[in-house]
Amino acid sequence: MFRDGRPVALAHTRDVGLEGAFVECPGVALAGNTFLELAFESGSRGTRRLYRIPVRVSRVATEGFGVVFWRFDRSLFRDLERLLYSPDGLAQERGSS
């Protein structure tokens, strides 16, 4: 997770969808409407790809915060589709379908 191009923290995402995600990151205090970049790495050995996706904090909770994807365009949509639905995407890495 990055803010203004600088690393903020390592975090775990859950409930990732085409509109946003929940970021588990207890102990990191962020206000609503904070702009960040989430970094996801996906793929198999030798074909790893890094995605940096701009997000806005939409909800703050004790165990983390909800984010919505920001600057949503065709390129971001394609990246999210690859992350969520490709055979070597996030769902496969977590063992879900």
Image (tube, helix red, strand yellow):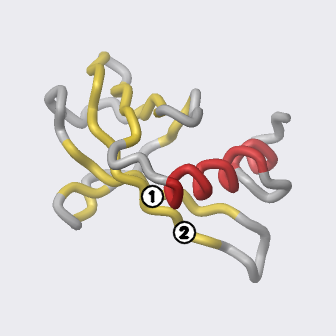
Residue 84 appears left or right of 20: right
**Callout 1, which amino acid?**
Ala
The spot of residue 78 in percent (x, y) is 61, 56
Marks 1/2: CA distance? Answer: 7 Å
Residue 83 appears left or right of 34: right
Q: Do tag 1 and tag 2 residues touch (Cβ < 8 Å)?
A: yes
Which residue appears at 85% of the width and 55% of the height? Answer: 87
The spot of residue 85 in percent (x, y) is 76, 46
Tag 2, which secondary structure? strand
Which residue in the structure is indicated by mark 2?
A: 50
Q: Residues within 10 Å of mark 2 (few under 14, many from 20)?
A: few
- Residue 84 location, quadrant: top right
Q: Is residue 21 above or below residue 9?
A: above
Q: Can you say which quadrant of the picture contains the C terminus?
A: top right
Q: Residue furthest front?
A: 74
95 and 51: which is toward the camera: 51
The spot of residue 18 in percent (x, y) is 57, 36
Which residue appears at 29% of the width and 57% of the height? Answer: 2
7 and 67: which is toward the camera: 67
Q: Is residue 18 above or below residue 87?
A: above
Tag 1, which secondary structure? strand
**Callout 2, which amino acid?**
Leu
